[in-house]
Image: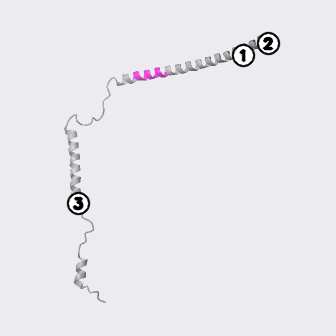
Amino acid sequence: MATGFSRTATHDLSHVGLALAPRRGGRAWLVRTLVVVAIFGIGVWLGQALPGRGVPASIPAPDGAASQARALRVELEQARLAQRLADARSQELERQIDALNQRLSEVHDELTFFRKAREGKH
């Protein structure tokens, strides 16, 4: 059963290169990587070469920092003590107000009793 194709035509078709997608350049990737590495290297070199331009290894604490911290702690403790005293005063005043309200209620009841007793005599 002959298909009509000669052996040379089939042979030619099987050896034709097909391009399904364009090739990506390996060189472009290499060039981009080298540029990034070079920029990074220049940045590191400039950071070390220029004195005073780099980030300091540690920030020195000022001499008065310890005394300032102590002063702030003392001030904080005084503020806490003042808050406790204010809370205690508030509670005591509330207790006194409750006692006065109770006494006012008792006096009001006595006044009502005496008024009714006086009206009963007339």
Q: Which stretch appears magenta?
A: 70-80
Taking the image as shown, residue 82 lies to the left or right of residue 14, namely: right
View extreme (left): residue: 49
First in sequence, mark 3 or 2: give its number.
Answer: 3
Tell me the kind of residue under disc 2: Gly
Cα separation between marks 1 and 3: 103 Å
First in sequence, mark 1 or 3: give its number.
Answer: 3
How many residues crowd mark 3 within 10 Å: few (<14), some (14–19), many (20+)?
A: few
Give coordinates of residue 44: x percent, y percent. Answer: 23, 43
Q: Residue at the spot x=22%, y=53% of the render?
A: 32
How many residues crowd mark 2 within 10 Å: few (<14), some (14–19), many (20+)?
A: few
Taking the image as shown, residue 22 lies to the left or right of residue 79, namely: left
View extreme (right): residue: 121
Where is the N terminus found, in terms of image quarters?
A: bottom left
Residue that carries the numbered disc 2 in the rendered image = 120
Nearest to the eye among marks 3 and 2: give it. 2
Residue that carries the numbered disc 1 in the rendered image = 109
Give coordinates of residue 41: x percent, y percent. Answer: 22, 46
Which secondary structure lies at badge 3? helix
Tell me the kind of residue under disc 1: Asp
The label on residue 26 is: 3
Tell me the kind of residue under disc 3: Gly
Q: Residue at the spot x=72%, y=16% of the render?
A: 109
Q: Nearer the viewer, residue 75 or 61?
A: 75
Q: Is residue 7 depicted above or below 63 in this figure?
A: below
Of helix, strand and loop, which mostly describes the magenta segment? helix
First in sequence, mark 2 or 1: give its number.
Answer: 1
Which secondary structure lies at badge 1? helix
Give coordinates of residue 91: x percent, y percent. Answer: 58, 20
Give coordinates of residue 24: x percent, y percent. Answer: 24, 61
